[in-house]
Image: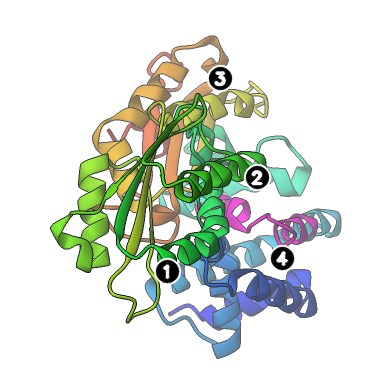
Amino acid sequence: MPDSGNNVRRFVALVGETAFRARLAELGARTGGPGLSARALQQRHAAELILGRILARGRAATGPERTIAALAGKLADAAVSLTKPARARLQARIAQCLAGDHTLMPLLHLARTAQAHEARGFGVAWTGLADGTAHDLVISRDGSTAELVCDVVSAEAGRSVHRGAWFAFVDRLNPDLSAWLAAHPGRYLLKMTLPEGLSGTEAEGVLHERVMGLLRNARRSDAEPQVVLKLDPLVMAAAANQTALLEGLRAEFGPEAHLAVTAPPAGSGGSMFVMAARAGREDEVAGAIARHCEPMTGRLSGTRPGILSLLVEDVGRGEWRRLRDRLEIEGAARGFLTGNAARAVVCVQCLSRLELFGEAPPDAAPDGELRFRNPSHPAARDAALAAAVTSTV
């Protein structure tokens, strides 16, 4: 069995244990709060926090931890084979991923892509690190080769109401809302329609003032081009159970709704304030994925078949399944493959954190990723490349 602790130590050595522990301390300070934004940050930086736990205890305790440790070890293995300048290039990329709002996911995606193709019988060259090529990897098998470009796309690019902005808005509103609820005990449901979406601190501030203005003036509704508010009594039978309540609200308002519950401490008589927000249009996550493919083609040399591998971030478990089950990603990817920008692309590969963390179907894709082959590419029927390019849908 691979030594997870050793894999993590070898990876941390690339950037320095002092620097890595400083990063963990920074993340601990940023994610230690009680709000939604802190929990979202914990999820965003899950890989770094996992590596920190393994480093502390010397071993991996769960399947996802073992998977992340193995990918970290894969990067450490790659470093051994690199020249000194190339190793410095990798170390600089790791340091960049451990700074600010960046995460390790782009590098872990690169390592997972190399690992997956080796498991399929391909030779893998890390040309991006070794030679500074615009593409990341070159795979080869039985005389056939292909270039791979790896990148990360956020599902937020396809949403008009950003989850990060919603979390920040709820955290900002909660203290004022709790104070209002203490003075006006009861159970309330605030329905919100946001025709212009929600993104950024300025929009959060405007929405905060709208909601509090509605409550201060004891109004039941407010309608402006930016926001439509409607305050009703909360009458759902499941209101006493927050989990069941959220499930009921999700069923009523749809999977794309943004929900939040504010409830004072126990003993306050069961008061509760629920918010359910929807954008003015449907999310276009699959479209955002397809749009992200076009600039990736600029990193292909054009001398070999090209494969685009995208890690889709900021997508929930249920949302990922819906995107697959409704064939939204397939439709968008195949639409991209019919365009001129995709002439050098033989396949588009997509995966989420579920696949990267090694989770199993049905939430994760059955083959560890979604693949969409470009039937018009000359290499589409190359038997040697089949394991990398054959469509999974």
Please say whether residue 229 is one of the residues in the magenta stretch. Answer: no
Name the outermost residue toward the front. Answer: 217
**Is the Cβ of the residue at disc 2 closer than 8 Å to that at disc 4?**
no
Q: How many labels does the image show?
A: 4
Up/down of 346 relative to 88, above or below: above
Residue identified by numbered label 4: 80
Quadrant into which the C terminus falls: top left
Name the outermost residue toward the top. Answer: 340
Name the outermost residue toward the right. Answer: 85
**Is the Cβ of the residue at disc 4 closer than 8 Å to that at disc 3?**
no
Measured Cα–Cα span from mark 3 to mark 2: 40 Å
- Mark 1 or mark 4: name the one nearer the start of the chain: 4
Q: Is the magenta stretch mostly helix, strand or loop?
A: helix
| Residue 93, x across and y down, in percent | 75, 54
Residue identified by numbered label 2: 201
Label 1 neighbour load within 10 Å: few <14, some 14-19, many 20+: some
Whether residue 144 can be seen here: no
Residue identified by numbered label 1: 182
Q: In this view, does 374 lie to the left or right of 10?
A: left
| Residue 78, x across and y down, in percent | 66, 60
Measured Cα–Cα span from mark 1 to mark 4: 61 Å
Comparing labels 1 and 4, the label whose residue is closer to the camera = 1
- Mark 4 or mark 3: name the one nearer the start of the chain: 4
Secondary element under disc 2, as helix, strand or loop, is helix
- 255 or 75: nearer the eye? 255
Q: Which segment did they paint magenta?
A: 92-112
- 245 or 58: nearer the eye? 245
Q: Give the residue type that dot 1 points to.
A: Ala
Q: Give the residue type that dot 2 points to.
A: Thr
- Mark 3 or mark 1: name the one nearer the start of the chain: 1
Q: Which mark is residue 344?
A: 3
Can you tell which quarter of the image residue 231 is in? Answer: top left
